[in-house]
Image (spheres, rainbow, N blue to C red):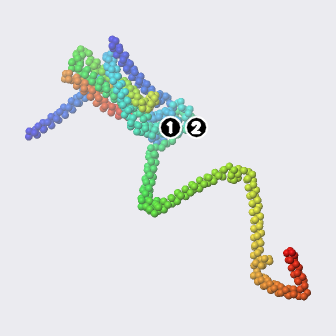
Amino acid sequence: MDTQNSTSTATVKSKSSLKSSLANFFSDVYDVYRFIVRFFKEAFVPPYEFQELLKQCYEVGVRSLLLISVTGFIVGLIFTKQSRPSLLQFGATSWIPSLVSIAIMRALAPLVTALISAGRVGSSIGAELGSMRVTEQIDAMEVSGTKPFKYLVCIRVLATTIAIPVLAIFNGLVSMLGGYLNVAVNEGTSFSTYVQQFFQPLAFIDFESSIIKSMVFGFTIGIVGTYKGWNSSSGTAGVGKAANSAVVTAMFLVFIEEVIIVQITGWFR
Amino acid sequence: MDSGENKRAVWVGLFISIGVVILIIAIFTLGNQQKSFVKGLHLKARFSNVSGLIKGNNVWFSGVKVGTVKNIAFTGINQVDVEFNVDPNVQQFIHQNALATIGSEGFIGNKTINIEGGTPDAPVIKDGTMLNSKGMLSTDDIMKTLQKNNENLLSITSDFKTLSKDMVQGKGLAGALLSDSSLAMRFRAVVANLQTTTSSTNQMAIELNRFGRKMNTKGGLADKMLTDTAVFAKLQQSANQLQDATAKASTLTDNLNRASSKLNTTDNAIGVLLNDQPTATQLKSTLDYLNQSSIKLNDDLEAAQHNFLLRGFFKKREKEQQKAQQAPKQ
């Protein structure tokens, strides 16, 4: 009798927990929605904080450039190297530049840039805003009349939305060079021929989709980082949690968005 | 704005500028390759099957990329109109009777439109020209042919299976050769004979070769015959004489023939002698009579020698003959 009671109690608790989780999830979704709406409401109205935007662009873009470039070079080199055996079986190694270009320009350049940026920038933003929240600096800013949302959130989201597409362009270029290194070593192809073959299978829609995709990724990384930091709590532990959560959520969303954007791009192709 | 912010602004500006420049270069490179920024001539071609051609595929003329496909649209049953742009620089080389065909950049590559042919007697293309088209051999056609080949191969292998089975069972000449040892032995003997014959032929060929070499020896008869004109003239003369002799012999033979044919007839003395039996009998009896008459005449002459009128003459001759015989001894 006691066992049955305890089982039914556990079931009730489990159902209650599930309901509570679902409620929390949808509550979070609503909070995110409000957060995004607030961003659009405040981001494009004066006063414009150009200096802060510049600073954030520097942090997000320029300071990530080396990391993104090295990563892009390695991705291009390794992707070319790993693609070679399959194409070699068909005697179609001359197709490597075309294959690499499609892979890099359509997917790898924006995706790798977004993932690296999510790790580096997203965590940084989450931790920065989280620490400001737990140390009540944001509250102080609100009290002092400064608009902390505009100054802290909008600027960072704008910075990631602007800088990450540029980083993706750099990443694409450097990946192309990485691919060329492998092709030049193995086939002795000249750079001009490689470039010609690299661009041959591409269309303008590939550039457009990559740039738009990178902007969406940048926006997502910025929004997730700032949202997690903005809503962090539980003292200093919350800062780490916010940083970690910002990275994981941003990366997850980047993949989800990749699937959706590829699907949408396919309709226009 | 302090110097740190200035420096940061420069870096960000440089970062974004370089990124934008790279993007612009990439766009122009792509645009240049796809002739996107060139106002091209719009051409059309109507196909019944475009085999997977899509917008953006390349247009080739004599192996050179001259444009891209701009639009593909159905215009009727089994009618697909393809619009494509062509570089105006090649306008003067493409004539209106040129053919547009669907090609491929490789065995599994992108589809292309290939412009081929065209003769100078036709005017050059203009904006909106509809080129004649020619269907291509599709993969389905190739697969159909391949399927037909497979069926043939199957038929051949089936026949070969039957054939090999019959051979194993000893049917037919090949089967008998394989299963009948005596036949195999005979066949082996035939082969051995053939080998011997071949060897003999070989030997004969060697001999002929040697003979030929001898014939070619300088100063030999054959060589003289082949090279010395005087010998040839003599030979010709001999041949002529031989021909004359042959003609005479022929005449002689004819005469003999005629004579012999006359011998078979009874209208001449010899023919009667040879062929007429009663005459022969008669002649024989005549000869018998003559013989008997000569015997009797001999007796009569013997008797005449002993006649007193003639006895002196014979005695006198006998004495002279005796004297003539004795005179040389003395």
Residue B282 seen from this side: no
Q: Which mark is residue B244?
A: none
Instruction: Compute the Cα span from label 2 to label 1.
Output: 16 Å
Q: Nearer the viewer, residue B308 or A60?
A: B308
Give the mark nearest the N terminus, 2 or 1: 1
Give the farthest residue toward the left: A1
> What residue sits right under mark 1 in the picture?
B114
Vertical order, B109 against A46 (above or below):
below
Q: Residue at x 32, y 21 (%)?
A: A60
Q: In which quarter of the image is the N terminus of chain B?
A: top left
Give the farthest residue toward the front: B330
Q: In which quarter of the image is the C terminus of chain B?
A: bottom right
Specify the amino acid type for callout 1: Asn
Specify the amino acid type for callout 2: Thr
Q: Does A94 sit left or right of B281 as displayed?
A: left
> What residue sits right under mark 2 in the picture?
B119
Q: How crowded is mark 2: few (under 14 residues within 10 Å), some or many (20 or more)?
A: few
Residue A79 picture quarter: top left
Where residue A195 appears, as percent x and y from the top left, is 44, 29
Q: Residue at x 86, y 77 (%)?
A: B326
Q: Does B316 sit left or right of A219 as displayed?
A: right
Q: What element carries label 1?
A: strand
Q: Residue at x 42, y 32 (%)?
A: A186
Q: Residues within 10 Å of mark 1 (few under 14, many from 20)?
A: many
Where residue B254 appears, as percent x and y from the top left, is 76, 68
Q: Does B219 sit left or right of A260 as displayed?
A: right
Report in which chain the residue with disc 2 lies. B
Q: Which of A104 and A254 is in front in this view?
A: A104
**Contact between labelled residues 1 and 2, with CB atoms less than 8 Å apart:** no
Q: Is mark 2 on a helix, strand or loop?
A: loop
